[in-house]
Image: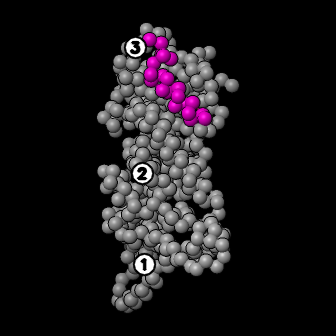
């Protein structure tokens, strides 16, 4: 059978084309790969023409003998459906997991994506994480998610909870949450490795100011995660852009009932300790006031809205003053290691001195490293100075030389 007549190739091309129509693939942005099933390889093998092996500077033993349908470097997703033999290709990994070669497609001298390292390493990680089920990796550049990385702290728990709070479907589809990695230069081994570390826990990794990298058993699953995460990000951006104060979200207790109903194992690292989760989250209170003007145009804290009534946020009871410390008490204890992020009490919008970093009542608590550290006790003059640790050289990173040749312009 011809590659382009197979279900896997058709489905792959449709996924790429859907991403293009959704506006996630400007120019050559994005790439994708699919790990073929043995029976699919058998179906199409007669049409292969193999090229020379290219050595990997790493080993991917769990992918030995596997074949991948993958986008070519510099390919424009808008062209994939029209010119699949140039914009796509199939590669084979050898039996030792140390070399790869092209065996179909890559017409006119194209080569696999510049993110080949990210694809191969992450196929290894996801294959192991899913007992061999995961087959698809998809990377896209959706705009609202990139916009969110400009305004939401790059903390995986805060990012995940902000996304889950926008759209009921998000926790269902993206139940492992998202992992946000640090900025890395596209096409580098650093990006591949950081993504792989994150992919050990989840199937959706955010590359700040760049895009989204998702994994799935099927193309529907991978594309569905990308679509849902971007939709939640879009809701977040639109709700903020409309200029109205945020008065509602999916709360912690909503998430708990949701996960119970659907037997969801939501990523525990992204939700608070159980007692906190079950504690009632601060909800906005709607105080109905007699209509003073047309119900469709009542003021909402200075902003005109078509929602009848006036929204008020509950004001938290003032904290009791702490009892004064006895004079003989030693210096302050270091802050206990707690969750990095705590639920900020909802304040009246006009009382907010600075914008809430998430806009959902989720505010970063001081990181343990940033918390006040007690003054060290004065050392006697003769006390020996602590020995400074000798800085150790960074372990050498493997050098990857299997990148495709420079892109053709
Ligand atoms: P490629 O064209 O090499 O796949 O690169 C696109 C991209 O999005 C890099 O992150
Ligand atoms: Zn990219």
Q: Is residue 337 visible in the rendered structure shown here?
A: no
Residue at x 52%, y 77% (from the top left corner): 287
Among the two numbered marks 1 and 3 on one chain, the one whose residue lies closer to the N terminus: 3
Residue 210, given in percent of the width and then of the height, sits at 58, 43
Residue at x 39%, y 58% (from the top left corner): 255
For the C terminus, the image quarter is top right
Q: Residues within 10 Å of mark 3 (few under 14, many from 20)?
A: some
Residue at x 64%, y 58% (from the top left corner): 241
Label 1 sits on residue: 378
How far apart are the alpha carbons under marks 1 and 3? 76 Å
Residue 43 - label: 3
Give the overall secondary structure of the magenta segment: helix
**Quarter assignment of residue 219:** top left
Compared with residue 291, is residue 397 higher up or lower down, i.e. above or below? Answer: above
Query: Which residue is more in the foreground, 330 or 97?
Result: 97
Label 2 sits on residue: 171
Is the residue at mark 2 in contact range of ligand 2, meaning its CB lies under 8 Å from it? no
Q: Residues within 10 Å of mark 1 (few under 14, many from 20)?
A: few
């Amino acid at each position: 059978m011809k590659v382009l007549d197979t279900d896997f190739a058709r489905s792959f091309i449709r996924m790429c084309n859907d991403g293009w129509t959704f506006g996630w693939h400007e120019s050559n942005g994005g790439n994708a790969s699919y790990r073929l099933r043995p029976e699919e390889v058998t179906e199409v093998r007669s049409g292969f023409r193999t090229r020379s092996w290219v050595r990997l500077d790493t080993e991917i033993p769990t992918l030995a003998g596997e074949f991948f349908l993958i986008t070519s470097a510099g390919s424009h997703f808008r062209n994939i459906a029209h010119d699949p033999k140039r914009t796509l290709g199939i590669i084979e990994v050898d039996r030792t997991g140390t070399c790869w070669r092209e065996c179909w497609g890559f017409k006119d001298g194209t080569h696999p994506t510049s993110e080949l390292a990210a694809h191969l390493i992450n196929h290894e990680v996801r294959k192991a994480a899913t007992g061999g089920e995961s087959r698809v990796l998809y990377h896209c550049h959706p705009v609202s998610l990139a916009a969110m990385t400009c305004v939401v702290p790059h903390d995986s728990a805060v990012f995940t909870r902000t996304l889950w709070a926008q759209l009921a479907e998000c926790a269902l589809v993206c139940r492992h949450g998202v992992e946000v990695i640090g900025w890395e230069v596209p096409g580098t081994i650093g990006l591949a490795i950081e993504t792989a570390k994150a992919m050990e826990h989840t199937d959706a990794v955010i590359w700040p100011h760049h895009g989204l990298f998702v994994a799935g058993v099927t193309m529907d699953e991978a594309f569905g995660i990308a679509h849902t995460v971007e939709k939640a990000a879009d809701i977040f951006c639109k709700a903020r852009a409309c200029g109205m104060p945020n008065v509602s979200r999916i709360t912690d207790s909503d998430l708990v009932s949701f996960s119970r109903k659907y037997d969801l194992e939501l990523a525990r690292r992204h939700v608070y300790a159980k007692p906190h989760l079950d504690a009632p989250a601060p909800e906005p209170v709607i105080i109905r006031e007699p209509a003073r003007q047309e119900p469709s145009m009542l003021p909402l804290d200075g902003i005109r809205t078509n929602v009848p009534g006036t929204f008020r946020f509950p004001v938290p009871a003032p904290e009791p003053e702490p009892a004064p410390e006895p004079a003989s008490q030693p210096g302050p204890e270091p802050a206990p290691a707690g969750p990095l992020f705590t639920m900020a009490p909802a304040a009246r919008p006009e009382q907010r001195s600075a914008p809430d970093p998430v806009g959902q009542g989720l505010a970063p608590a001081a990181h343990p490293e940033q918390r006040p550290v007690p003054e060290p006790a004065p050392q006697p003059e003769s006390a020996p100075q602590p020995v400074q640790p000798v800085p150790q050289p960074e372990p050498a990173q493997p050098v990857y030389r299997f990148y495709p040749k420079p892109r053709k312009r």
